[in-house]
Image (cartoon, rainbow, N blue to C red):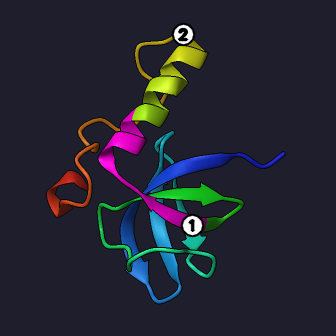
Amino acid sequence: MCLTRLGQVLEVDGTAAVVRDDAGRTTPVSLLAYDGPPPVQGTWLLLHSGFALAPLDDDQVAGVLASLRTVTGTGTPTGTPTGTLTGTAKEDVP
């Protein structure tokens, strides 16, 4: 089963990016299926099966994380990066 998830760009290299996903894992993703402006460090992306599909804004990210909290019944989903819900600012990415 494949799940769609979130990832915040750590670095971009041509048609690939390294992202930290909503569970805190760092992974490479392909940008070949990406539809949006060129991603930069700090951009949140919609990820599916190793591909980045589209950029997400702060409201979309906050909504998804709130839904995860509701589904899991926890205050914060396990492993969720903290201090990173402010969009594309480079200072948000360690």
Q: Can residue 94 be seen in this view?
A: no
Tell me if mark 1 has few (under 14), some (14-19) or many (20+) residues whose alpha carbon lies within 10 angstroms of its own. many
Tell me if mark 2 has few (under 14), some (14-19) or many (20+) residues whose alpha carbon lies within 10 angstroms of its own. few
Q: What kind of element bears circle 2?
A: loop
Write down the region rendered in magenta.
52-62
**Residue 57 drawn in magenta:** yes
Q: Position of residue 1 (x, y in %)?
A: 84, 45
Query: Badge 1 is on which residue?
Result: 52
Which residue is drawn at the image coordinates 61% and 82% (left, top)? Answer: 32
Answer yes or no: do the residues labelled 1 and 2 have beta carbons within 8 Å? Answer: no
Q: Name, please, the residue furthest toward the right.
A: 1
Figure quadrant of residue 81: top left
Q: Where is residue 16 in the image (x, y as percent from the top left)?
A: 52, 80
Q: Name, please, the residue furthest toward the left.
A: 91
Figure quadrant of residue 33: bottom right
Q: Position of residue 20 (x, y in %)?
A: 44, 54
**CA separation, marks 1 and 2?**
28 Å
Q: What residue type is labelled 1?
A: Ala
Q: What kind of element bears circle 1?
A: strand
Which of the marked residues, 1 or 2, is nearer the chain's N terminus? 1
Query: Badge 2 is on which residue?
Result: 73
* Residue toward you, 26 or 51: 51
Specify the quadrant that holds the C terminus. Answer: bottom left
Which residue is drawn at the image coordinates 42% and 21% (left, top)? Answer: 76
Q: Where is residue 47 in the image (x, y as percent from the top left)?
A: 59, 58
On the rendered structure, is 12 left or right of 64? left
**Residue 91 drawn in magenta:** no
